[in-house]
Amino acid sequence: MSLKPKTRIQKIRYYAVIRWAIYIFLIFVSAILMNTGRGVKPIYFIPLCICICMNEGEYTSAVLGGVCGLIIDQAYGKAFFGFSSIIMIAICVGSTIFFRHFLFQNGINVIILTAVCTFVYQLLDYFFFYAMWNYEGTGYVFSDISVPCILYTVMISPIAHIIVKPIVKRFYPKKAKTIEEAMKV
Amino acid sequence: MNGFFKSFKFKIIVCIAAFFLGIGLYSVSKGGETSGLSQAIGLVFNPIKKLSNTISDKVALVIDLFVDSEVYVEENQRLREQIGELNRRLIDYESLKAENEDLRKFIGIKEQNDDIEVCRPCTIISRTANDPYGTFIIDIGSEEGVKLYDPVVTSEGLVGVITELAKTYSTVRTILSPDLAIGGLCIESRDTGIIEGNLSYAADGKCKMIYLDKSNKIKVGDLIVTSGNSGQFPQGYIIGNVTETGIEDSGLTAYAVIEPAVNPKKISSVMVMTDFNRTEEENQIPTGNIGEKATEATDKPEYDSQKPSDDDSGGSSDDQPEATDPTEENPDEPTDESGDE
């Protein structure tokens, strides 16, 4: 029995399964990296989710953001398990809409969007988990943890784009030409 | 874009977000018990985390040996000098110990920490990402008799307490965290205070002993142990040494900076103290606070409005100078009818 798709519908499903298997593997690797070693670590999920969600629908992005948020909370040991999910849903759905309507799908835009999203995430995290409780010396958290975390996350965003781009190119069914392709023609 | 916010799609996405918000609220309402979803994620990732951290630690050790070799040579030299000094102290200690034994027998005091029960040595599965206090997860849970707020120790000293409990793993909040407050006692001067984490000192792996009387006699190098006043920690367990002393900005109390005997950020295995000599009343953990905070908070003056406490019986600011007396003014200090200390 051959597993090779014959009809177009079969082909779309076949590619979707492969694409999401690779995405899940990347999410799994990111989760392991977030839990490995000591010191400040980037939030691998933000650039990865942005890159994945550029080509997916709103519902898929929302679910992906929610699940990735839970994994982030598990890695961070947050008492409010679900805090990151809400932010990640906003990030993922936002990136889907932005890339569909306003932005070109290129590395620069991924970096900019990652920088903005990570900054907002870290700002909310800093406010809700440190500043709001009036801990002494909260400035240390922002300068020594939040800022390096933002920088590291921005630094890895091109890598995420480089990894996800060929997956999309190879396993995303083309319905019509993208704006970039149309402009090149 | 405006159309999106009015669309059915947006409403569905809001519902998904509300679902995750519900998960968050549910986990908060569990009060320290790890939620099922978190446990499920932990179940999948913990074995892999353990493996990846083992590899990462070994790689880091090799790199560390090359990078910090000069530091190790200096540390070795310093430790040799310290061993010489300690050996000299040991001679004094032996004679004092013999004398102490005689006195103990004479007054019939039971040897302390006799009935401490510790679990098997636990491995640190992982450390919470980007946490300034070195919070970590260990591979032991409620299945092996560990309870919420059990002290976590090593043979060198106190590390922290269990703040989240799952069946097969637990989260340990370290003594560097400001959420944890431990009654501390200076062995040499008998001054007492509260040991709390502080973000400024957590970076260097240190914590702060606060609410000390201004006339305290604590000096650099003094040994700080648990006072055991509230019964959440055994009495006389080593916390660390004093590295700095000073007066608080308010000018009302003094503080001491403590270098813990165990740096929670550098350990790889710990033990959980599942039981020690404490009464039933002492076993009652106050809600809303961790460890000794609620009970010790009664020592705090009222001007400390930044640290809310569930204990409404807190003393007034007039109590402050007396609060450092280890034997008199702590309302939660075990008395004849409740204590074993």
Image (cartoon, coloured by chain):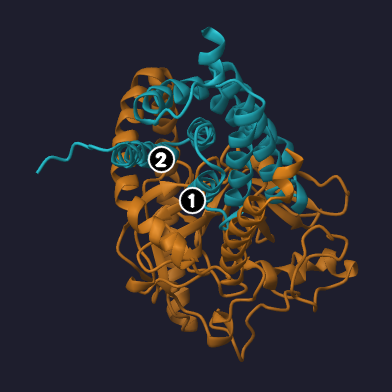
Mark 1 on the same chain as mark 2: yes
**SS for callout 2:** helix
Q: Establish if A91 lies above or below B21.
A: above
Q: Establish if B70 lies above or below B29.
A: above
Q: In the picture, residue B192 is in which quadrant?
A: bottom right
What residue sits right under mark 2 in the picture?
A: A27
Q: Give me the chain that's cyan.
A: A
Q: Establish if B219 lies above or below B111.
A: above
Q: Are marks 1 and 2 in contact (CB under 8 Å)?
A: yes
Q: Chain of mark 2?
A: A
Please give the name of the residue rendered at 67% of the width and 47% of the height, measured from the top-left corner. B198
Mark 1 surroundings: few (<14), some (14-19) or many (≥20) residues within 10 A:
many
Q: Chain of mark 1?
A: A
Q: Is residue B331 left or right of residue B38?
A: right
Q: Establish if B209 lies above or below B24.
A: above
Q: Which mark is residue B291?
A: none
